[in-house]
Amino acid sequence: MDYEAAYRLLFNTLTDIDRLIRRAQLQAEQMYLEQSDIVDITSKSDDDPP
């Protein structure tokens, strides 16, 4: 394997890892937002009777 092919393989691998990390971050953020929506829905507001 020549240097150019090794460099391309390394670059593609790192690009794939970066994509996976970004996708995981987006999924974690989405899960957090869905969780906070649930908390907001179930939390009592000041207008609710005691």
Image: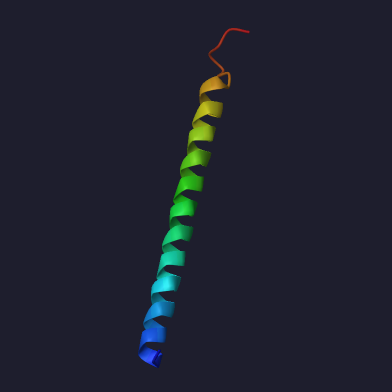
Q: In this view, does 18 lie to the left or right of 47?
A: left
Colouring chosen for the image of the structure: rainbow
* Quadrant in which the C terminus is drawn: top right
**Farthest residue toward the front?**
1
Tell me which residue sits at (53%, 34%) in the image.
Answer: 36
Q: Residue 10 appears at what percent x and percent y? A: 44, 79
**Taking 31 as reference, is 46 above or below it?**
above
Location of residue 13 with respect to 34 vertically, above or below: below
At which x and y percent is residue 12? 38, 73
**x and y percentages locating residue 31 in the rendered image:** 50, 40
Give the residue at x 40% y 92%: 3
Residue most extreme to the bottom: 2
Residue at 55% x, 11% y: name it.
Answer: 48
Q: Where is residue 13 in the image (x, y as percent from the top left)?
A: 43, 72
- Which image quarter holds the N terminus? bottom left
In the image, residue 24 above or below residue 8: above
* Residue found farthest to the right: 50
Label count reads: 0
Q: Which of 36 and 47 is in front in this view?
A: 36
Which residue is nearer to you in this view: 12 or 38? 12
Q: In this view, does 42 lie to the left or right of 1?
A: right
